[in-house]
Every structure is written in C-alpha cells, then in structure tokens.
Image (tube, rainbow, N blue to C red):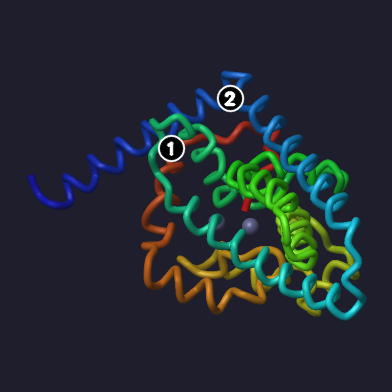
Amino acid sequence: MTNKDTADDGLRLKRAQFNAAMALYEGRRRYKVFGKLVAAANVSLQAFLVYRASAHSIGAARQLLVFAAAYLAADFVNGLVHMHTDCMDDYESLGGPLIANFHLHHKRPRYQDHPLPFVYFNESGSKVWLVPCLAAAALLSYAPGVSPALVWGLAYFGVLSSVAEVSHYLAHNSTSRWVLLLGRARLLLDKRLHARHHLEDNVSYTFLNALTDPLADLVAKRFYPGYKRGTDLHYGNYELPPSGRVNEA
Ligand SMILES: [Zn+2]
Ligand SMILES: [Zn+2]
C-alpha cells in the first residue's frame, strides 16, 4: 500500500464522516434548537453586560479608548476561533454536526438574505465559546474593586463579537455603497480583504474589520495547516440543499 493509497483512504473516511455528520445536523432538530439557545444566551448576556457597564461613567476619552481596544480584541479573538474551527475535523464528536455545518461556508460563501437583526441573533448561535466567556464577564462585573473600564470593555467585546458576524454577512451579501465605504474605512470587513480567505489558503481569518489580520496570519502560519488541502476536501461528496443556509465565517 503506497502513501497515496493511505491518503485516499483517509480522505474517503473523512468524507463519509462529514456526510454522516451533516445527515445528523439536517435530520435532528436538536442542533437547530441548540443554536437558538446559544444565540439567546449570548444576546441576553451581552444586554446584561451593557446594563452592568452603564452604571459606570468613565468619561468620553476613556470610553473611546476602551471601545477601540475592544474592537481590535473582538476582531482578533473571533478570528482565532474561526482559524481553529476551520481546522477541526472530528466529525464523529458530540459537536461534529456543528463543525461540519460550519465548514460549509467555504463551499457556498453567500448567505441567504435576511434582515440584519436576524443575522445578528442567528449567527450568535454559532458562538458556543462566547457563552462561558460572557458568563464569566458578568460574574466579574460583581467583583469588588473591578475596573469600570474593564466592564465596559467586556460589554463592548461581547456585542462586537456578534457584530463581526453581521460584518462578515455584509461582506458577502451586500453591494450597498455604505457597506463598501465602511469596509474601505476598515470599520467593517472589506470584501476584497475577506476574499483572500476564500481564494487563498490559511490567511485572513479575522472578520470584524480585519485590522488584526497580519497578526492572525502569523499565528496561522506558525500553528495551523490551512484548509484548502484539509477540511475543504471533506465536503467534496456533500450535496448542498437547494434552499441554502445562514452560515458562519
Ligand atoms: Zn473560514
Ligand atoms: Zn466568508
């Protein structure tokens, strides 16, 4: 048996596992319900953190500084999570169907069109990791002596993590002049920058405004193998349903 035969067998197995995971995702309501629960938890915790932060006044200058720091942090951290998830291929694990569904964005990048509040809520359902982070931030906001600027920063980080999903949606689906301008101004995700993620390999994972892409690219180069010759091959035998889906980064 040659190395090529072994590689072919490995790919066949991954494709079979991928299709089985998607059959589970499509056949069992529990995965969609889970997504709605995660979205509800994230949005509620974001609202709660904003409420906790609003009890503190930190002045306009610090407010702006904290917001800018949270913008960069949300761009980078969400990009890292995207990087990690793009490389996950344990389709037989408990979260396997969610992982397989996540990878389908690379197969069909365009989303179904929806109103932006719907996108904000729905895409927050893919952010399982954010729930414990926001719950910890909510608890931290009660800690004695905690910095009000930190509470504001965590509230902004939480909200901007979901805004990143809307920014990514707009980069794929919108042709509005405003979206193009905001992308060029690097306040939202620029279409051309994000196109690199889909056309090249192992680059441009960040998707709020991609300002931290150079740093994320360094992490990817050092620690991740990329997706073009990895997980992107696993959906090779999968046929997308014609109705499409609202999907992730
Ligand atoms: Zn990706
Ligand atoms: Zn994309």
Question: Is 50 placed left or right of 231 in the picture?
Answer: right
Ligand 1 within 8 A of label 1's CB? no
From this viewpoint, is residue 117 visible?
Answer: yes
From this viewpoint, is residue 165 visible?
Answer: no
Question: Is 18 placed left or right of 1 in the picture?
Answer: right
Tell me which residue sits at (73%, 71%) in the image. 190
Which is nearer the N-term, disc 1 or disc 2? 2
Q: Nearer the viewer, residue 38 or 173?
A: 38
Q: Residues within 10 Å of mark 2 (few under 14, many from 20)?
A: some
Location of residue 132 with respect to 174 vertically, above or below: above
Q: Nearer the viewer, residue 189 or 104?
A: 189
Which label belongs to residue 7? none
**Image x and y of residue 85, in percent:** 49, 50
Answer with the quarter of the image where residue 247 lies. top right
Tell me which residue sits at (83%, 43%) in the image. 114
Location of residue 44 with respect to 228 vertically, above or below: above
Q: Are marks 1 and 2 in contact (CB under 8 Å)?
A: no
Question: Is 162 placed left or right of 102 in the picture?
Answer: right
Callout 2, which amino acid? Glu
Location of residue 30 with respect to 124 vertically, above or below: above
Name the quarter showing ligand 1. bottom right
Element under label 1? loop
Q: Quadrant of the N terminus?
A: top left
Callout 1, which amino acid? Asn
Tell me which residue sits at (84%, 46%) in the image. 47
- Residue occupied by mark 2: 26
Q: Nearer the viewer, residue 26 or 78?
A: 78
Q: CA distance from mark 1 to mark 2?
A: 16 Å
- Residue occupied by mark 1: 237
